[in-house]
Image (spheres, rainbow, N blue to C red):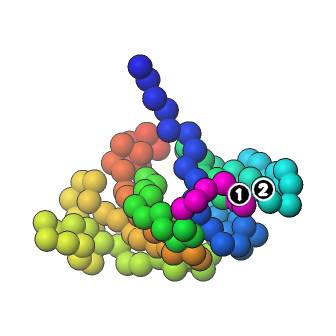
Amino acid sequence: MQYRLEVVVVPVTDVDRAKQFYAEQLGFHVDVDDARSEHTRIVQMTPEGSGCSVTIGKGLTDMAPGSLKGLQLSVADIEETRAELAARGVPVGPIQHHDGTGFVDGKGETWNAFVFFQDPDGNSWAIQESPTMRQELGL
């Protein structure tokens, strides 16, 4: 049996604020923004090149806003990504790698370069440099 992860629900307090963050600051494409009733709103957004979307909204989940931790994106160039996000006002940390005991500043070996940030509600994200993506893009 095959499974395909296509949507992750991210719990937020203010749908418009979160939509602005994900769409304008992170650059996710807004696929759907549908208010079915005064109690339900679905906003689905997809990172460029991703087969998985995130959905924020009203009336979607019992998770507390800010409780989703460990979401991860992959990119071809961690330095370029970090610089772009910082320029867009995303509160992104320094490039780090795991040294076996925890995360420390600087880039590590293959598959070991990350930046971290939180959305306005405190949901936490990691971005990892992917050598596979670098190869696919000819970098």
Vertical placement of residue 103 versus 23, above or below: below
Residue picked out by circle 1: 59
Q: Residue at x 80, y 59 (%)?
A: 39
Using the rendered image of the protein, determine whether residue 49 is visible from the camera's viewpoint. no
For badge 1, the amino acid type reads Gly
Classified by dominant secondary structure, the portion drawn in magenta counts as loop
User: Residue 62: within the magenta?
Assistant: yes
Q: Measured from the top left, where is residue 45 in percent x and y?
A: 67, 52
The first of marks 1 and 2 along the sequence is 2
Q: Residues within 10 Å of mark 2 (few under 14, many from 20)?
A: few
Rendered image quadrant of residue 23: bottom right
For badge 2, the amino acid type reads Thr
Q: Residue at x 52, y 80 (%)?
A: 91
Magenta residues? 57-63
> In the image, is 132 to the left or to the right of 4?
left
Q: Residue at x 31, y 63 (%)?
A: 113
Secondary element at image label 1? loop
Check residue 40 in the rendering and tell me which mark sits there, or answer none: 2
Q: Measured from the top left, where is residue 44 in percent x and y?
A: 69, 51
> In the image, is 46 to the left or to the right of 43?
left
For this rendering, which residue is in front, 134 or 94? 94
Residues at badges 1 and 2 in contact (C-beta under 8 Å)? Answer: yes
